Image: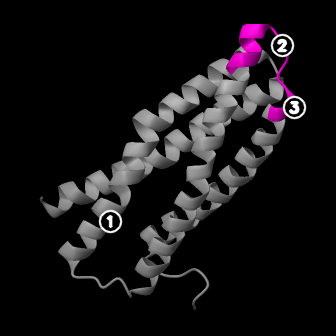
């Protein structure tokens, strides 16, 4: 694959990964705070769908295209910004995987409440707190990865 096309796919998939993640998280976060059972259930359905259609494929493409770019450029994995990017990507994914599982459970709880005409239950709130905490952690880790990709330097190294 041509280097420019490979780089474009890498950048595009990072944009989709980050953009879909932030956009869908905002959608579910705002709906959850409003506490309208139907709105929460609908948002949870949309977020789970967005993860399967957008976020997951982009999350898979990122390391594949990144490693392929390293190979094409002849950059070793030990290059500091590369090594840190890989470690941080693993951390971000370690935050994101439980988020996916949690939001699938949140969707089920919200849909059950919607079907029964009940308010959003306390079980949803507990999951929402974990989902929010892990999501914010992944968000800030991805911001740092973006810095490393653009600057190709460690922000804490002078």
| Residue 6 x/y as whole percent | 22, 58
Q: Mark 2 highlights which residue?
A: 118
Q: Which residues are magenta?
A: 111-123
Residue carrying label 1: 66
In-front residue for pair 158/15: 15
- 135 vs 64, left or right, is right
| Residues marked 1 and 3 touching at CB (< 8 Å) | no
Q: Secondary structure at mark 3?
A: helix
Query: Is 79 inside the magenta-drawn segment?
Result: no
| Total tally of numbered discs in the picture | 3
Dots 2 and 3: beta carbons under 8 Å? no
Badge 2 crowding class, 10 Å Cα cut-off, few under 14, some 14 to 19, many 20 or more, is few
| Residue 83 in picture, x, y percent from top left | 44, 80
- At horizontal 35% and vertical 48% (from top left) the residue drawn is 12
Q: Position of residue 148 (x, y in %)?
A: 48, 72
In this view, the mark in front (2 or 1): 2
Whichever of callouts 1 and 3 sits on the residue coming sooner in the sequence is: 1
């Amino acid at each position: 694959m041509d280097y420019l096309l490979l780089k474009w796919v890498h950048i595009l998939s990072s944009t989709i990964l980050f953009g879909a993640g932030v956009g869908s998280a905002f959608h579910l976060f705002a709906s959850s705070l409003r506490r309208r059972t139907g709105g929460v259930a609908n948002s949870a359905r949309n977020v789970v769908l967005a993860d399967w259609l957008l976020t997951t494929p982009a999350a898979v493409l990122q390391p594949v295209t990144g490693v392929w770019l390293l190979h094409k450029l002849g950059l070793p994995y030990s290059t500091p910004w590369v090594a840190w990017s890989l470690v941080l990507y693993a951390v971000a994914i370690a935050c994101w995987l439980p988020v996916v599982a949690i939001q699938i459970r949140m969707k089920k709880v919200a849909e059950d409440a919607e079907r029964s005409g009940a308010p959003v239950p306390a079980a949803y709130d507990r999951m929402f707190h974990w989902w929010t905490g892990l999501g914010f952690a992944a968000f800030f880790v991805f911001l740092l990865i973006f810095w490393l990709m653009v600057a190709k330097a460690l922000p804490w190294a002078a």
